[in-house]
Image (cartoon, grey):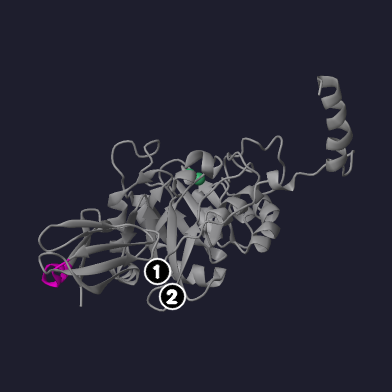
Amino acid sequence: MNTKITLAFILLFGLKSFAQDLNNVQFPHMQKTSVRKEIRMPNILGYQTLKCDFHMHTIFSDGVVWPTVRVDEAWEEGLDAIAITDHIENQPSKKYVTGDHNASYEMAIDRANEKNILLIRAGEVTRKMPPGHLNALFLDDVNPIDTKEPIDALLAAKKQGAFILWNHPGWKAQQPDTCLWMPMHQELFEKGLINGIEVFNEQEFYPIVLDWCLNKKLAVISNSDIHDVTSHFFDIENGHHRPVTLVFAKDRSLKSIQEAMFENRTLAWFDNKLAGKKEFLEAIFKASVTAKPTGKTDGKNREIYEITNISAIPFIVENMKGQVTTVPAESTITMTLDLMDYQELTIRNCYTGSNSILHVNMP
Ligand SMILES: [Zn+2]
Ligand SMILES: [Zn+2]
């Protein structure tokens, strides 16, 4: 067949066989399906374990995304609840994006309801140190926290029953040498105007803050403070995740999250590290990792066990002889073990203080 005949053949029969609408042909399979990555985390102590991020920005302050994008990201990354916390005092897009301090919440709430993401109305009081930056969460109206004096903003938030969170206390732009608890923070703390502190923020860890939280009975918090698209900043495709606060709530509702946070029922999670109160760390570890004898032995007649970790966090376990095993996330490994060596464990990636890690006794 010569080329001309081939072309005519294709035009005649080829087009005919594909003939649908010559004006508009649809390729729906080329559209990406939004997929939620589930974060497996056991429920503990009669509470539901909720995955939360209480700090993020949109175009209504200095973030680069529209508020609904924050909901879509949270859904895809397996979260239960988020707070959009646009800066009260820093709104570089104000010239182009009008709207008051409630705008980002109001733009996002319908999408949040559709996606079953719990959305917290909030704002970030953004001042020089001290007191630095603080998020007011669970507000009814964000506008009253736009005041001249920072303390008035926090009092206005408190009046609405807000949970107040001290953000990035060790951020070098504001605390260049040491992470300091200043007299003004003491004053705010005594007035009930600091209820939790970020131990992890964006890609930073402030170990000393863990001691502050535990000593002063404040909630440990881990937040992204994301300004960019989350998948541009964190390597989510390769299994990394944003900083997440685990909240142990009576049920999956805003009211129960708020109650849990005031009662310090939280853990901070980032980069395979968990930080917070011993009782929650121990409960999460014991609910995640189990050892089951297989009934088989190896060549030296040692019992072989299946060690299973059902959670999204790998655990680095050290036995009484100093031998270290990593039990990968959502996986089972087999190993021979002498139970006598595993009666007391040290979990190297669970932090109970700036300088201490979790020790557990096994039954
Ligand atoms: Zn900030
Ligand atoms: Zn921020």
Task: Identify whether 257 is placed above or below 23.
Answer: below
Q: How many labels does the image show?
A: 2
Mark 2–mark 1 distance (CA, rounded to whole Å): 9 Å
The x, y position of residue 277, in whole percent, is 30, 65
> Residue extending furthest front?
1
Please, what secondary structure does the residue beneath circle 2 have?
Answer: loop
Between 222 and 21, which is closer to the camera in this rendering?
21
Q: In this view, does 67 lie to the left or right of 321?
A: right
Q: In which quarter of the image is the N terminus?
A: top right
Which numbered marker is on residue 265? 1
Q: What residue type is labelled 2?
A: Tyr
Q: Do the residues labelled 2 and 1 touch (CB within 8 Å)?
A: yes
Q: Is residue 3 left or right of residue 97?
A: right
Residue at the spot of label 2: 47
Kindly tell me whether residue 197 is visible in this rendering: yes
Kindly tell me whether residue 101 is visible in this rendering: no
Q: Which span is picked out in magenta? A: 337-344
Please, what secondary structure does the residue beneath circle 1 have?
Answer: loop
The x, y position of residue 143, in whole percent, is 64, 53
The x, y position of residue 151, in whole percent, is 49, 53
